Every structure is written in C-alpha cells, then in structure tokens.
Image (cartoon, rainbow, N blue to C red):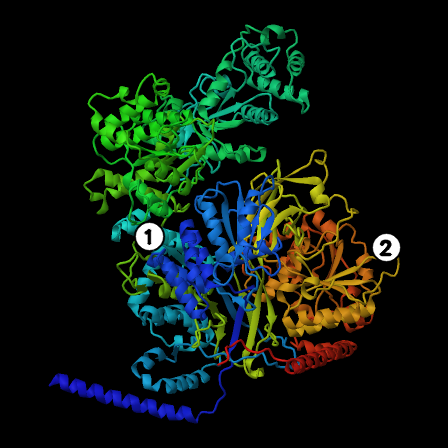
Amino acid sequence: MTLKIATNMATSMKSMMLSYLYLLFMLVQCHAAGRSKPITTSLDAKWGTHSVALEIAEFLAEKNNDDFWGYVFTLRHLTDMSDQAIYNQSLQFASKYLSPTEQNLLILSLAMHSYSPKIEMYNQIALDLPPPADCDSFVDIHGEITCNPDEVPKLIKSVSDRPPPSMYKVDHHYPGSNNNPIVAILYGDVSKWKTDAHSFHKVLMHLARDGKINYVLRHYIMDPNPKKVRLSGYGVELAIKSTEYKAVDDTDVKEGSNQEQQQEEDLADEVQGFVFSKLKQQHPDLAENLNEWRNFLLESTTKITPLKVWQLQNIAFQSAQRILSSSGHDALRMMRDISQNFPLMARTVVKTQVDDKVRREIRSNQKTLQMQYGIGPGDSLIMIDGLMIDTDVADPYMMLDLLRSEGKLLQGLYQLGVKGEDLNKLLRIQVESNEGDFAVDVRDQSVMFINDLEMDSRYQHWPSSIQEMLRPVFPGMMRYMRKNIFHLVFMLDPTTPDSDMMFQLAEMFYTNEAPVRIGIVFVVNEEADVDGHEDAGVAMVRAFNFALQDDGGDAAKALDLLIKIHNNADGNPITVDNVIDTFEKMFKGEDIQDIIGLGSDYDEKRPHGAAFFEKTALGSLPQVMLNGVPFTKQELEPDNFEETVVSSIMQNTPEIQRAVYQGKINDRTDILEWLMDKPRVMPRLNPRVLSGDNQIVEFAGQLDAKELNSTDFSTLSSTGMTASMIQNIKYLTKREESTLRPVTEWIVCDLATKPGRQLLHEAVKNLKSSNDVRVGVIHNPSSAPNKEAHWLARAAYAVQETQTRNFAKNFISKLLKESNYQSIVSGKSKVQDYEVNGMNMGKFNKLFKSDDISIVESHQLFSGRVLGLSPGQRAIVANGRIFGPLGDEEKFIGQDFTLVEKLILATSAGDVTERVKTTKVGKIGDKDELTNLVMKLDALVAASPRSENRRELSHVEETHSVLILEPRSPEEPSFEIVAVLDPLTRDCQKWSHILLVLSQSLNVKLKVFMNPKDKASEMPLKSFYRYVFEPEMTFRVDSSSTAGPSAKFYDMPPDTLLTMNLLTPESWLVEAVRSIYDLDNIKLVDVETGIQAEYELENLLLEGHCFELPSGSPPRGLQFTLGTQNQPVMVDTIVMANLGYFQLKATPGAMLLRLRQGRSADIYDISSHDGTDSSANSEDIIVIMDSFKAKIVKVKVNKKPGKEEEGLLSEPDEAVPKAGGGGIWDSISSLTGGSGASKKQKEPSSEGEETLNIFSIASGHLYERFLRIMMLSVLKNTKSPVKFWFVKNFLSPTFKDFIPHMAEEYGFEYELVQYKWPRWLHQQTEKQRMIWGYKILFLDVLFPLDVKKIIFVDADQIVRADLQELADLDLNGAPYGYTPFCESRREMDGFRFWKSGYWASHLAGRKYHISALYVVDLLKFRKIAAGDRLRGQYQALSQDPNSLANLDQDLPNNMIHQVSIKSLPQEWLWCETWCSDGEKRSAKTIDLCNNPLTKEPKLTAAVRIVSEWGDYDNEVKRLQEKLYKERNQGEEEEVQEEEASPKKDDDHTEL
C-alpha cells in the first residue's frame, strides 16, 4: 500500500514538474531578447596540415624503430578516402603495434598534432637541398639526387669519394642498416599511395636488407596543404579591465565578411542551480526548449553583480561544496565552469551552504598537506604516478611525453604479469644515478701525501676527538679537527699546462689550512733507470721530493717549486733546463745533478704512478678525487673547484656523523681504511661502465618467440628477436644450482678473434667471485659465419646445449686459454681433447659436428639489428644495458665486470630483486624464470629513470572533500593522477579542463583534493578563461575534418570591458593575425554579431645559456646567429649577463647556430655545446627544432689566442654589421617582402647624419591611434631620418596591416621587435604590467649593437620639437636620461607619493622621474650591465605583489643609486596633470597623463589639450580611408576577373 502511494506521489510530482516546465517554456517563447554574441579564439601554425598517417608514423618511431618501418610498409594499402576514413584506417593499421594504453595516447596526440613540427622539420630539410622540380619523391645518395627508382643502384655504385649527407639523431634508419657507410635518403610522402615514395621504398628496402646501403627516410610534401595546423594546448583569458579611465577607441569598426557565427558548443552546463545535461537526459524530447530556457536564464545572469566583502569570506569553501555536490565527470565540469566563469557564477555560488563535515575534512587535510609538502591553503599540486608536475610551466605537450614514458612502464609491468598493488610497489623503484657513487681505492703506494692532519704540528691547536663531528656548526662551515677524514688526491702529469693550475689549487688548500689531507700521484715515466737529465717529468718529481723531504719538509715550498717551473717555461713545453734553472734559484748550493740524475735518492713513489693511473682506468689527466670519488671535468675548472671540494665534504659529512654516532668510527679507527673498505670502492673505475648514457634493450612484451635456428628469425621485429634470444640463450654460473641471480650478462664477441676470446675469458673467470651473476654468449663474427672459421662459437653453443652448467663453464674455460686455442688451430690437438671429466661427449659431438651454423647467423643478425653493432664488434649487455661497442684495443678485465655487477645491483637490480620477492609474480617456482623476470623488470625500470622520487599523499581523509574518479577499465593498467586545487585560482582554470580531458581520453584513476583559501577580501578571480585541449579529432557529417579546436566564450556580460590574453607554452611566439575588433578592449554591447580572433604561431623559441671559459662568466654582448645551411643568418640575438641567457626565433627544421660574423666571431671560438644535435666539439652547431616543447642549449666559448684582453663592449666606435633579416629585430621584409624602408625614405641631409631611433609600445586600438599620431608629430618636427621600433608582442593585426602603408606615405623606416619574457624572470600576469616590463627590462637585448642611442616616446604623446636635440643631449656619463615629474601644479600635491615615506627617504633629495619619455645611451647601458642590474633588482622586488606598483617608473627610480639617471630639462615633457598651464608654451612634448582627480577620458583630453591633435588624427584617418577604398576596389576587381575567367571542366567520366 505504501509503495503504491509513493508511486502515485512520484507520478503527481513529475506531472507538476512538467507543467511548471511548460509554463516556463511558454514564457521563454515570448522572450524576444537578442542571442548571445560569442567570442571565438583560434591559433594556427604557420605550416599546413599533414596526413594523420605521418603523425602516427612518428608516434610509432618514438616507441620502436621496427614498428615505424612496419607501419610505413602497411601504408601502401592506404587509399584516397575521406578524412575520417583515412583517420580510422590509419589507426587500425597502427593498432597491431600498440597496447590499449598507447592507442589512447596516440588518439590524444593526434588531437594535439604533437608530431606535426617533426614532419615539418623533415620537410624543411628537404626544401633546404633544394628538391628537384615536379618530383614528389626523390633520393639523395651522397649529393646525387634522382627522381627515378631505377637509377638508385647506379648511383650507389658511383658513390666513390663523395661525402655522405648530413645525418641527424632523429633520422629513421632502416633496421640493421645504420652502420653502412653508403647513405641513401628517401624524401617523400609515404602516406600517399599515388606518389613514387613506395616504389623507392621497395628498392631501398631490398638494398638495405642486402647490406648495401644505410637507408634513411625523411618526410617531404611537395604540395603543402593550404589549411594550417590548428593548435591546442594553450589558455585564453578574458580579463575584466578597470574602467576608471576610459581607454576605448570611438572609431567605427567596419565589419567584414570574415566574421562567421560559430555553432554554440561548450555551453555552461549549470545555470542558476539547474543542471541542463541531467534535464536533457530525463526529457530528451524537450531538448530544444531546454536550450531556450537556458538562454533565457543566462540573459538574466550575464550582468556581473559586485559582492560585499563579507560575502567573499567563505566563497572558496562554497565553491568546493558546489563541486562536491556533483559526482564523476559532472563534478569536474562543475569545477571547470566555476573557475572559468567565476565572475558570473559568483552570485549563485555565495548562496551555497557548506557542510560541516566537508569543512572539517578540508581543514584537516590542509594541515597534513602543509606538513608533508609545504602546500598551504590555495596552493596547487598535481602528481602523475607520484611524480610532481610544475603546474605553472607544464602543458599538454610536456604531459604527453611524461604519460608516454609512464604508459610504457605501466604497460611493460602489466605484460610481465605485475598487477594491482604489486604494480605500485615496482613502479616506485628509484633508479639511482651512476655519477659520484663509485670511488677508487687510493690506498696505493704511488700516493704521496704532503700533509697529515693527525701528526703535523701546524694542526696541533685543533681538537683531536672524532666526536667533534657531532658538534653543530653554522651551515656551510667545515669542521676543523686533527683527523684524516677527507683525502684530496691529485693525479697528474706535472709537465702539462693543466697541472700548473692543479698545483696552485693544492697550494691554496694547504696554505689556508683546509681540513683535508692532500695527496699527489705523479704520472710520469715509470722506468727504473730513467735519467732526470733526459726527462723533465722525472726531474720535476725528484726535485719535488727533495723539497718535501730534505728542506725541512715544507710542502708549500715544494708546491711553489712546481708552480715556478711552469712560470719559467712561460707557456712552452717544460724542459729539464726549466727545472734546473728554477731549482738552483730556490735551493742555492744544492747539487741538482745528484738529485735528478740516475740513482737518485729522491725517487720514492715515482715508479708506481703510471701503473696506478692505468689500473684506475680513469681515462685522462688530470684527475682529482675526494675520498676516492673522481671530480668531473667541469668541477675541475678553477671557478668551480673550491666550491666542489667544499660541497663534496658537506655531502659526505652526514655519513661520517652517522658512523660516529652509531659507534662504527672512534678515535682509534683508521678512517681511510674504513672509507676504502666500503662496497662501492673499486680498484678500477672504467668510464665505459660509469658513463650513464647506455642504450637499453627492450625486454618487456609478450611475444611469440622463435627458435634461433628458425628461418623465421630474420623476419622478426627487434622485440621479437629479443624475446627469442631470452627464451633460447643458455647461461654459465658460479654454481650449478638454480637460484635467483639479479644480474644477467650477455657477452657479445667474435670468438675467432683474440680480443673476443679475452673478453669472454674475463667474464667467465669473474664468475668465481660471485653467484649473483649469470653469463650468456652472443656470437658476433666479423665475417659471414662458416663452420670452419667459427668452430669455437659452435663448440661453446654445443656444450651449453648438451651439458650441465659446470661442465660447460669448465670446458669453455679450457678452450679460451690462448695456448689451447692455438694448439687446436694449428692441428696439434682437437676440441675433444679438452673434455671435462664426466661430460657426455656423445651428445656434444653430435651437435658440434652438425653443419648447421644458423645459430651463429641468428646471433650475428641480433647483434646488428637489436644491439646496433657492426660484425665483429664486442659489447657487454647487463640487464639490458649495452656497454659498448668496445674499441679494438680497449681492455675490459675482471675488475670491470665486478664494477658492472655492483653498478647494476646498486642502481636498481638490488631493489627490484627485493621487491619482486614480496609480490605475487615473485612466487615463481622456477628460479631461472624468476631471474629472467628480474632481468626484464630491471631493464624496464632502468629505461624510465626518474631523477625525482615518487611521492604519495598519506594520512589524508577522503570521505567528504575529495573528488574520486575510478579508471574506466579497471582490469587494464591505469595512470594515477592526484590533484590538490583551490577552485578559485588561475591554476584551477587551466588544470580543471586538462584533468577532465585526461580522464575522458585515458584510463585514469583521479583524485582531486579541495584546497580552498578562506577569508578572501576581494574577488579571487577577475577573468573568464578557456583552455584549448580536446580529447580527440573531430569530423563533420560529410566525414571531412573540422577546423579544429578553439576557445569559445558564450554569454559573456555585454557591458563589461574585457581584454584578451593568450597564455601559451613557454617556447611559443604568437601574434594576432586577424581580427577587426580591438582585442584589448572588448565590449560586446558595441558588437553586432560576435568576435572572432585568429592568432598564429609565428616562431618556436630556441633558448640557451652561454658561458666563457675558463672564468665561467657570461660573455656580455656576444651575438649568435641562427639559420640554415642555405641561409646561415636568418635571426640573431645578444647574450645577457643574467645566466648567460639568450633566445632566438626558430622554425621547424635543422637550424645552424653560429657566432655572428664581426667582433663576436673575431674574438671568440665555440669550445663545447650541450643539448644540440652536433658532436660536442663541432664548430657548426646543428639544433633540430622538431617539437612544440622548449629547446634549451648550453654553449661554452673561449677567447682566441691573442684576444684575451679584448672585450665586445669595450670599443664604442667599432663598426658593427647592420642587423639583417630579422631575429629579435624583425625586419618588415618578412611581412611585406620589402626592405623595411619606404620608397620615400628621407635621405640624410648631410654626410654622417645618423638615423634617429624612436622606440614605443602600444596595445589596443585607442593607443595604436595615439601611436600613429605620435609618429606623425615626430615626423613633422624632426629633420633627421627616423626609424621607429615597436614591440610586436602587443600590436593588433589592424596596426600591423596599416604601418607599411604609413611608412610608404611618410618615408620612415620601422622594425617590429619581439622578445619572449624569459621563463626564469618573475612573470607578470596583467597585460599592463607586462607592457611596463617591456619598456625597461630588455633594453640591452631588444636592439642590435649598431643602435647606439634610442629614445622612448609614449604612444599618447605629441612631439613639438626636433627629437634629434634630445638624442644629441649630453647625459654626463649616465646610461639614460628621464624627465622628472613636474611639481608646479599645486592642487596635485596630495597625489605626489614620492614626496613622503619610502620614496622621499630612498631618493634622498633626488627627483622622481616619469617614464613617458627617456633617452638611452645603449653603448653605456650595455657596458655597465645596466639591463642585468635592472633585471636582478626586478627579480628581487617583484616577488612582493605590493612592490613596483608602477613598474616602468618605480624600477629605474629605485635603482637610481646603482644606475644613475640624467634628469632631462623639464621642457622635454609637459602633462596637464602635474605641470602648470604656464609651462605648456615651452613644452617640447605633451603627454596625456591620466588625471586621478578628474579621470577625464583620454580622447576628450587630447582634443582639449593639444590643438594640433585633431589635425593629425584627421590626416591619418584620410590615409586609412584611402587605403580602405583601394582595398575594396581591388577585391571587387578580383571577383570580376574570377567570374569572367573560363572554368576548367570537372574531372569526370562521360556516360
């Protein structure tokens, strides 16, 4: 009965609800208000779209080279279809190479077009050749190009001495062909089946398989798609502008036909408490009416209602509650809607009641977050699988890289059977770094210690107890005690120039009584009967020993002797005469002949130095070790050495302290013995092992393995070959029993060669010392395998296949003995003669005498295809890490194998082994299979190293205040994303959308912790925001691809003044290219249909840091150029002193980075570089630009011989080449094809007359209108030729379109300069403050060196005098001159903030200057590093949001004591706000300053104050009208011509 009543009530309620909705719908139908005016923003690349098939190919190339080539081969089946059909078929082709996780990532990357720059990079390389005409595909064979596949074999035969083409790290080499010296590069579009690319591919593929060529494929698109690549991965902000001062242009906008109405998508889901997605699900038949109702509600809410301060107190918690009231993806959408539309949604959010349980849990979690991570309320945190993400810098392109790496690791673990909690355990294995972990045992008789802290009298005043280690000291201070704890050992050849500096450093540490014991190893001639009269090195050592032993044991004097010998040589090679001459001056009366001659008594330790150096395998001299740990070359540089020693001591101190505290060290302990007995101390440190740049073989993957002697082996992919090798290879071990062995070594060698036999012999011999290692043999013969030549390889294989491990090990050991091998080769004995007692020789002989050599062939093929080795090359593969190829003469002995074992165990294998034992997969009964699993897991983990530890949130509550989304496929591997966000922050505006997309497109477990900041005193968000990032590509009904993603703002408040900002990734240089409206001042009430803004990615940023050797300081004023091989100078830049920073505008391609010709190239050479695609010592630096992500290079330079005293900024009168072609100096020729100067350009009136350089900056149509008028006033009053410089970053498309015509009309030059705010410099978020920053922070790098003076003139100024007067004004040694603020209008005294408080004290009687007009002596400015000083002070002050209120003025005035200001005569700047009316008559410029009393609009003030302003304005308008009419007339003529031209017949078949 109760159920029936409830059912009737529910039916009645539903009926009432529907009736209510019907009444509302009727009301809506009667509502005649206008529709929403959308604001749409899109961003395109400069290059055309590419086939998705090519983007997929590049995605696969990053995964696996074999998969790339396999996919390329399948593309021959791709035919001309619709965009959507090509997309689907291309994905289907790729699916067989990808796991489900990888397929999801591929779909996401296609939506982002993340591989488009890489394809364009290859295309640009082809265009630089240049390509042959009318040829869609061609092949380059050592400079000879053909479009005919049939000509390829002939060109290969005729290669002779032609040099090979340039190769890059990103090139695609056909599997197994990359070691061939003959290179054939195919340029073509393999996604188009009609081109010749596939015919070429077939020919080249067979030639590569036959070992005749190194086949390389590069993409080339002969006919680029006119449709540009639509980009995503950026934010668009509509910030609410202050209307205190009216700054909107009143000029009518002429709307063109390009303003298209966009379909209304991405509408706000929740309006005034109604969730429309839910309503549409419940009432699908009312969808259209619900949309109308939604619009009706929106029109009543699009007015922003100011909130009282008391209403804002709790609003962040109310927002969190509103989000948590929804669930799943709806909650994420709610979070996005609130943060991105907060100014409109605020008035409904404040009505939300916060649950006490939610509030308590949030506050409890905030305390935990503060303690664990230092995250306070309102702060943000994003973690993916425990890895912390920089929320400010990270973008989807960076995220995709991380997700691909994590996905590979997750999928690999999953395929190896690791799931659930076990997966989380193994995921958190930390791969330790190789560097700095291992030490050399310095307990060698060759080490000569020159001091003893425990015994020498000079240290007797220090405390002697080891307990002093536990005494607290100030941070950074060393502990001084009479204990030999830190041993600093120098290993060097005393005759080399490098050793001179080492001796000086050793002397410095000794004479300053640093608490280190100093030892020296002299690496000189070790022969016993060498005569010091014939060997300078031996003479130096014996003379040093004499000074150290017989002359009172003065180590400082002994070191001084060596330093003076170098001084005596004066940079020339040291001779015996230098030694004798110096010695006799210092030690008068001593018999030098006896001291350095044969039979000298001072030869102690000298004979052992070279042997010790060779034993350590450290490679090059000099070497310095602290407690046996070698320093890097960079750490040995003089500027770094002292800091390196001190920091190394600090790093080692905690370990010593722990040992003292735990009682492991006491006053009786020989600390050197204790240190050298540690497990990571080795007698030998082979750089081959410790380099850390090893390739790693991919072991993960459940593939069907083949027998190694199968004919199918050669057809396998590299992963298939690896799986087959793992399944079939047999191992040698120390003991017979099956046990878990953490380290697996594959010895790759040719046993027919002595080095190959020695390598395997050392590996087998090393097994005696460890049962943690197993050794397998991979045969890599230097010639084609045959039965006779490779009998030892066949014998090793046969014995391993037929005998036990012990028998196999002992038998192989016998055969590897060189005497036994030679005996067999000479016929004196047979293989069987070395039988080990107990072997089953019948089985052995049967397999050994077989004619089958396919095993050796398979091994050789595996060595080439998978390991990348040429036939005969040797290598060691340890848990997947490839150490090799070894050089022909390179030794790899037993101690090196011990080092490999310790390295593998220490970096990750030891941790993997221990964790595997605690997992379900670790319960495998077969220990050999378990060892295989450990090997695979270790290789997988090592291939994805993380420098940072994985973190996890612990001790937090998740019941009421955490949004949790479970993975959509729980049985598949999933990413774990943890976010801590305040809904009312800029971070949440961006990340709420990114998290929503990731959760929709990937298998993700997502947790979002609410972290609201309480008690807001003002609106926490004053902007609307959209983030452009879509989960997948979209297509129209006709299966063609859509235009792509864009930012869409609907239902914005019509009466609110908004300004648009694009928030792009750090490395993007973007400009607005199409919009007739003022994007800086958007007011929808003044717009007819909506606003469409189109932006373009103009350039990708190449950033770098440059330092001078040996000082390590940045070379201020050094210039770099960037270009291509055909056009070496396309852009140029100047190095800052701040961090040696420089930036260059680049495009996808192989870019050439060089020192600029002129003084930079005359004074400096490039000594090394990092992060480039050239060898470190190459003079031509190639930088591959193939990604949307940041590219950062490091360059070191040194002065040329004879140029050491010259400086780049030291000669003011030097002639510097004119800036050409752009760079940060973006010549107008790049826009119009012209020279950047007008045809009517003024000729210099007299010989030597220089161009007057005027700099200004403007944003928004009103200020651009002012700017044009300012320019006109300059031109009317200045006689000199004028060149204007404008910051391009903020200019509208309208201004950039008009300025060439104005330059043509009035005869001036101009350039648009562009500079990206450096990532390391504190960022400004408000556009006005960014503009202020550009006025002052980058003056030293914005302009080329040939610009000696520049005058900044505010856009809203009128010039009434010849500015050449200002340029000629003597600044009395100051780098710049500013006009002081007027003080003559007394009614403004209350606004003169600089007259009291901080400013009055700081200025100390000096004037406070206005930034509306200033002149800069750029030569002086650069010489005194003014720009670097200003940036440094800005960085310090700008962290405080209350500092630098007027950035462009406050900063130079704040720095007036460090960077002096010349006060210009007051007549140079008059503004009504601050200056009296009487001073106006003598004013040379008039500035339209804002008036805080009247707040008069600028346009009104301009007409009233400046009599000539209206004339200037009308003159510019007449030119604009003229151009507008000409353009319309031209367009009409084009249309008429097009209509009159004969139409081509459509391609069709007549029926």
Residue closest to the far right: 1246
**Label 2: which residue?**
1248
What is the three-letter code of the residue carrying label 1? Leu
**Residue 1220, image x and y in percent?**
71, 55
Q: Is residue 828 above or below residue 343?
A: above
**Residue 587, image x and y in percent?**
64, 11
> How far apart are the two marked residues, 2 and 1, measured between alpha carbons?
70 Å
The N terminus sits in image quarter: bottom left
Q: Is residue 1540 visible?
A: yes
**Residue 1476, image x and y in percent?**
76, 71
Number of dots carrying numbers: 2
What is the three-letter code of the residue carrying label 2? Gly
Q: Is residue 332 above or below residue 521?
A: below
Q: Secondary structure at mark 1?
A: helix
Rendered residue at 66%/9% (across/down): 588
Quarter assignment of residue 1469: bottom right
**Residue 1006, image x and y in percent?**
33, 61
**Label 1: which residue?**
410
